[in-house]
Amino acid sequence: MAVVLPRTTTSAPSAPAAGLALAALATLVWSGSFVTSRALHDSVPPVQHAFWRWVTALVAVAPFGARQAWRQRALLRRHARYVLLASLLGVAVYNTLVNQAGLTTPAATMGMIMAASPVLMAVFERLGGVRLGARRTAGLLIACAGVTVLAGGGAHFSSGSLWMIAAACCFAGYSALLRRKPAELTGTGFLFTTFLTGTALLLPAQAVSVTVQGSFHPTPATVLPLLYVGVASSAVAFFAWNKAIALVGATRAGIVYHLQPVCVALLSWALLGETTGLPQLLAMALILAGVVLGAGSRR
């Protein structure tokens, strides 16, 4: 009778751990983009900021994604409406609204408003026929209470905050759309195509901005932040976020995204000298509690 000995295996980094690490990387890098939007508010017009961001991202991704996109061109044409909508929400409109909000809104406030986007994703799910349940509904109400504190507590709530709320809606719509991405549209080819399409959609607005507002002056103070948002916040962060969703799912990756207000507040304090008072802290607590409760997985 043969004796079968148990096999020993070496523990390797698990896919969930890698997915959560990638989600954390994307969250941290995106937090820096809010600080950048605020830092460039008086030197680079919002549309031009967004346009050159995506031109830079397109150049950074092209060596890895252009050939794959060409091989997938038949699939991309078949799903052209999906690609167009994802590019419009996630590339062209979302970042332009963030830059517009940065004209008058502190970076910390921008990050706190964006923290409500996972709950907005749940709203889009409900519109798509998914039941929210009492837990997600309560989370939505708590997060909305946090935004109300920003509006009524003197926490730097301005017209730019309304632009930021619109940006949060766009990002939530993009993320909800990403969950329904056709399985065959994968890899850097899809990323390259959305960057290319979004840049093309921004071309008319870019032409109007240059004509009316004039071009910004390229200096180290403007070019270096644009390189950061183009390479890190666009190419690296979007790739990491999409890979994280593939590894752990959108819900678990979205939980890590809740850390963004804390990251933005710390970065804006360290780099821009922005202060955080009691209304911001209370709003942060309410929004974080709302998104954790509302976007958490149900047993």
Image: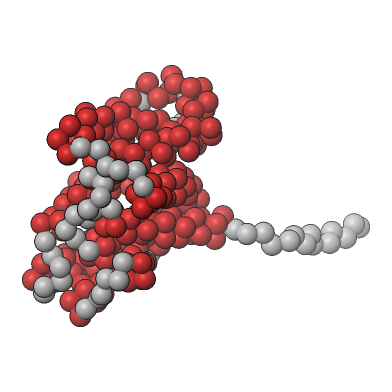
Residue at screen point 22% across, 45% down: 45
Check the image and tell me how it is coloured.
secondary structure
Q: Is residue 126 something that shows in the picture?
A: no
Residue at screen point 36% across, 47% down: 219
Residue extending furthest bottom? 278
Residue at screen point 47% across, 47% down: 236
Give x and y (percent) for residue 245.
Answer: 44, 49
Foreground pick, 48 / 233: 48
**The N terminus lies in quadrant:** bottom right
Foreground pick, 285 / 91: 91
* Among the 4 quarters of the image, the one containing residue 179: top left
- Residue 129 to residue 208: above or below: below
Give x and y (percent) for residue 156.
Answer: 15, 68
* Among the 4 quarters of the image, the one containing residue 114: bottom left
- Left or right relative to 13: residue 283: left
Residue at screen point 79% across, 59% down: 7
Foreground pick, 221 / 187: 221
Residue extending furthest left? 152
- Residue 117 to residue 92: above or below: below
Give x and y (percent) for residue 27.
Answer: 40, 58
- Left or right relative to 198: residue 152: left
- Residue 204 to residue 52: above or below: above
Give x and y (percent) for residue 160.
Answer: 15, 56
**The C terminus lies in quadrant:** bottom left
Labels in figure, total? 0
Q: Is residue 9 something that shows in the picture?
A: yes
* Among the 4 quarters of the image, the one containing residue 105: bottom left
Foreground pick, 132 / 114: 114
